[in-house]
Image (tube, helix red, strand yellow):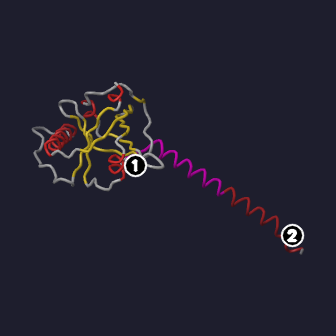
Amino acid sequence: MRQIRAHQPRLHRRGAIGVTILVIVLALAAAAFLTWFFACPCERTPGSYLRGEVVQEPVTDWGFANDVQLCQIQVNTRPLAHAINLNCMATDEGNLYLSCASCEGKRWSTAALNDPRARLRLDDQVFPVRLARVTDPAELDLAWRTRAAKLHRLRGSEGAATDNPRPEDGAWWSFRVVSAAQDNA
């Protein structure tokens, strides 16, 4: 019996150290989760919730979107929202498109097909929007040419934008973006 009592304080200390380490690990995990949740999408790492000044006024001319490299889109997934960086481009008429390659089955595009409500962040402004997949070949060609012109301009290339043909149907998707505030105007 004496040996058991002699080891009890040491066991109690080990238990306290183990609990302390567990608390530290859980605190670090919570901090990492919150950083990811509120700071991303970052580069190729998706995020969840887009923060910024929410713009409730209807947007009819998205031309200013061509001044940013990438748009950030937040779609409704369960249990958390899903946000990523995407190519976005506005036509000369002010219509906005998002695009992605090999889009079928991606989490964000599947969510957008199931629920068109989304949030779009350009710089520090967040816009409630609705997404609609484009399937009309003429409109897909327009979105592709608009994408090429934007990338050409952002890269500072001289001369005309390249006339690379649009990838075959299914290999490259585009979504038309409409201000959700227009629904309430």
Report whether 39 appears left or right of 111.
right
What kind of secondary structure does the magenta stretch mostly adopt? helix
Name the residue located 82 percent from the left edge and 67 percent from the top edge: 8
Q: Which mark is residue 5?
A: 2
**Alpha carbon of mark 1 to alpha carbon of mark 2: how far?**
53 Å
- Residue kind at label 2, given as amino acid type: Arg
Toward the right, the furthest residue is 2
Q: Is mark 2 on a helix, strand or loop?
A: helix
- Identify which residue, 85 or 120, lies in the foreground: 120
Name the residue located 34 percent from the left edge and 46 percent from the top edge: 112
Q: Are circles 1 and 2 on residues that touch, CB within 8 Å?
A: no
- Identify which residue, 169 or 167, lies in the foreground: 169
Report whether 29 appears left or right of 161.
right
Report whether 140 appears left or right of 104.
left
Q: Where in the figure is residue 174, as x and y percent of width and height?
A: 24, 45
Q: Where in the figure is residue 64, as x and y percent of width and height?
A: 27, 30
> What range of the chain is rendered magenta?
21-42
Where is residue 93, by image quadrant? top left
Q: Residue 46 carries which label?
A: 1
Magenta segment includes 39: yes
What quarter of the picture does the N terminus occupy?
bottom right
- Residue kind at label 1, given as amino acid type: Pro
Magenta segment includes 118: no
Name the residue located 34 percent from the left edge and 42 percent from the top edge: 116
Q: What element carries label 1?
A: loop
